[in-house]
Image (cartoon, rainbow, N blue to C red):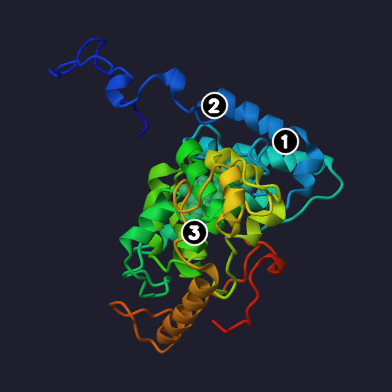
């Protein structure tokens, strides 16, 4: 608009009744001093402060490689944690991008997209662009870039995943961090998204997407849907044989299980040998740790080895059906115009995945 419309005079409510500002208790909050406060303060001032703090360490910026970050680091996360500020417009993506370029100019070398820090903002714009040009981007049905996969319905398993009660401490700690903070590291998001979909439970990515949309403080329509399409091997990324282990993946970064102990206090005294697989601890060890599996903490909802094997088989069948132009669900999935992506620097290197022979997608 070239001309702004006029605002009504102060106090003119246009005939509407003015209601008082609701009290926090009326919004469902209890005693605030007892509430778990997520580590985010809102606003532009805070966003700029956090951005400057991140960019101050020029060496860190120059060497930033997303797939090498530690997803279990929570006291000092391995990435900028600026996503909530970008999402709410407290920080301009364009300004952030140019500030990164300023740092690059002052360092001799720096990493390059897609793994670099500037590359992360390109991912953001990539998902914005592709979602804008793709009808039904947010769903499987009628979405031409989405593999049609006959995901299964299982309310019980879904709720266990959603509520952080799968019996796999690495997965549960991430889902609890999501509930408490509204933020988790990118590779932590990979772990739980893979577990829910093509890794273990074979449940529809749209269900996981909805949980993230509701609970993420940085919840963003294009980025969230795009990443769920990616992680479920429904689009962009097709190496469904590469499955994150809910046991060894987290252990690689945090052998002592400090991240798990923080977010699942009932496991805080479990010896490190068993922290990722508490069901394997002898009863005497469970008793000493005051955590009996099946009573204080759930037993695993599935056996990872068997479940992931079954998932690979189902994915193979679904891909074969898509290749033949058939559709195991509904409608016609014509994927002929889709470009094939490599892992695009979003994933961790092969060594941390369960090994399976590669299949053509
Ligand atoms: C299943 C799944 C769902 C996700 N849902 C969201 C979401 O709703 N909102 C959201 O902002 N991010 C989402 N992400 C992407 C990514 O995990 C977060 O952007 C990142 O963890 C935010 O932390 P950061 O700000 O410290 O990231 P940094 O690594 O510091 O990156 C800086 C910024 O780049 C952008 N960015 C980074 N990674 C990605 C990516 N993979 N795709 C697109 N943009 C990226 C974000 O705006 C981020 O704030 C999702 C990832 C997965 C696997």
Image position, residue 237 (x, y; %): 55, 70
* Mark toward the viewer: 3 or 1: 3
Image position, residue 293 (x, y; %): 50, 52
Q: Nearer the viewer, residue 65 or 268?
A: 268
Q: Quadrant of residue 56?
A: top right
The residue to which callout 3 is attached is 193
Residue drawn at x 51%, y 49% is: 292
Q: Disc 3 vs disc 1: Cβ atoms closer than 8 Å?
A: no
The residue to which callout 2 is attached is 44
Horizontally, residue 123 falls left or right of residue 255, namely left
Give above or below for 62 relative to 282.
above
Horizontally, residue 316 falls left or right of residue 251, namely left
Secondary structure of residue under mark 1: helix
Residue 123 appears in the figure: no
| Distance of label 1 from label 2 (alpha carbons) | 16 Å
The residue to which callout 1 is attached is 55
Residue drawn at x 62%, y 81% is: 358
Beta carbon at label 3 within 8 Å of ligand 1: yes
Q: Disc 1 vs disc 2: Cβ atoms closer than 8 Å?
A: no
């Amino acid at each position: 608009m070239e001309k702004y419309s006029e605002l009504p005079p102060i106090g003119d409510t246009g005939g509407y009744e003015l209601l008082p500002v609701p009290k926090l208790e009326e919004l469902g909050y209890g005693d605030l001093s007892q509430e778990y406060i997520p580590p985010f303060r809102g606003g532009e001032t805070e966003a700029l402060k956090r951005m400057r703090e991140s960019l101050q360490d020029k060496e860190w910026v120059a060497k930033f490689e997303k797939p090498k970050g530690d997803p279990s680091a929570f006291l000092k996360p391995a990435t900028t944690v600026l996503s909530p500020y970008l999402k709410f417009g407290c920080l301009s993506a364009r300004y952030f991008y140019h500030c990164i370029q300023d740092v690059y100019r002052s360092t001799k070398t720096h990493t390059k997209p897609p793994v670099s820090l500037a590359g992360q903002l390109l991912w953001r714009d990539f998902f914005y662009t592709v979602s804008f040009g793709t009808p039904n981007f947010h769903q499987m049905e009628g979405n031409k870039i989405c593999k049609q996969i006959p995901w299964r319905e299982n309310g019980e398993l879904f709720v266990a995943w959603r509520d952080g009660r799968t019996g796999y401490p690495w997965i549960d700690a991430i889902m609890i961090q999501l509930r408490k903070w509204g933020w988790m590291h990118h590779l932590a998001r990979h772990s739980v998204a893979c577990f829910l979909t093509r890794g273990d439970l074979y449940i529809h990515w749209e269900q996981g997407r909805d949980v993230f949309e509701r609970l993420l403080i940085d919840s963003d329509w294009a980025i969230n849907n795009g990443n769920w399409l990616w992680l479920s091997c429904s689009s962009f990324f097709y190496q469904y044989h590469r499955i994150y282990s809910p046991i060894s993946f987290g252990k690689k970064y945090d052998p002592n299980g400090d991240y798990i102990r923080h977010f699942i206090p009932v496991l805080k005294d479990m010896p490190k040998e068993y922290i990722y697989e508490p069901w394997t601890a002898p009863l005497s060890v469970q008793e000493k740790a005051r955590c009996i599996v099946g009573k204080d903490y759930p037993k695993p909802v599935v056996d990872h080895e068997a479940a992931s094997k079954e998932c690979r088989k189902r994915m193979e069948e679904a891909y074969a059906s898509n290749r033949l132009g058939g559709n195991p669900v509904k409608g016609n999935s014509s994927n002929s115009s889709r470009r094939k992506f490599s892992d695009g620097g979003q994933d961790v290197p092969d060594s941390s995945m369960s090994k399976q022979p590669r299949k053509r997608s």
